[in-house]
């Protein structure tokens, strides 16, 4: 599948925490960083996400906020 999203980050699921309607998915990127995604519980189940699943995080945003001290 080809996608227009340019920010494609390969990684591995390290945890899936499922609530009543949403799931929080933590992904260890191939570079070692960890990111978190909140998706619907149905989407997580449809994708078969579980610890160890190889995934690609697709980041499409019009804004990225940065903070410094």
Image (tube, helix red, strand yellow):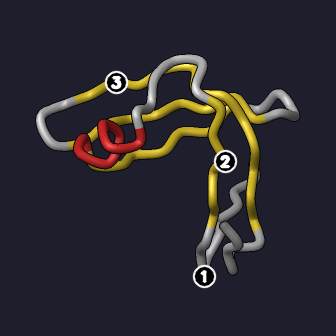
Check disc 3: other Cα within 10 Å, few if <14, some if 14-19, many if 20+. few
Residue under circle 1?
A: 62
- Residue 49 spot, x, y in % from top left: 44, 31
Residue sitting at the far right = 31
Q: Are marks 3 and 1 in contact (CB under 8 Å)?
A: no
Q: Judging from the image, what secondary structure is the residue with disc 1 in?
A: loop
Q: CA distance from mark 2 to mark 3?
A: 18 Å
- Residue mark closest to the camera, 2 vs 3: 2
* Precedes in sequence: disc 3 or disc 1: 3
Q: Which mark is residue 6?
A: none
Check disc 1: other Cα within 10 Å, few if <14, some if 14-19, many if 20+. few
Point 66% across, 28% down: residue: 12
Residue under circle 2?
A: 56
Check disc 2: other Cα within 10 Å, few if <14, some if 14-19, many if 20+. some
Q: Are marks 1 and 2 in contact (CB under 8 Å)?
A: no
Q: Nearer the viewer, residue 50 or 32?
A: 50
* Precedes in sequence: disc 1 or disc 2: 2
Q: In which quadrant of the rendered image does the N terminus lie?
A: bottom right
Q: Judging from the image, what secondary structure is the residue with disc 3 in?
A: strand
Q: CA distance from mark 1 to mark 2?
A: 19 Å
Locate residue 23 relative to residue 53 in the image: left or right: left
Point 87% across, 34% down: residue: 31
Residue 64 falls in image quadrant: bottom right
Establish if 46 lies above or below 24: below
Residue under circle 3?
A: 17
How many labels, in total? 3
Q: Are marks 2 and 3 in contact (CB under 8 Å)?
A: no
Locate residue 15 relative to residue 4 in the image: left or right: left
Point 35% across, 40% down: residue: 44
- Residue mark closest to the camera, 1 vs 2: 2
């Amino acid at each position: 599948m080809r996608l227009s999203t340019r920010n494609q980050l390969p990684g591995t699921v390290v945890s899936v925490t499922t609530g009543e309607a949403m799931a929080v998915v933590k992904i260890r990127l191939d570079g070692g960083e960890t990111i978190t995604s909140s998706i619907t519980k149905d989407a997580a189940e449809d994708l078969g996400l579980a610890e160890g699943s190889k995934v690609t995080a697709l980041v499409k945003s019009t804004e990225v906020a940065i903070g410094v001290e």
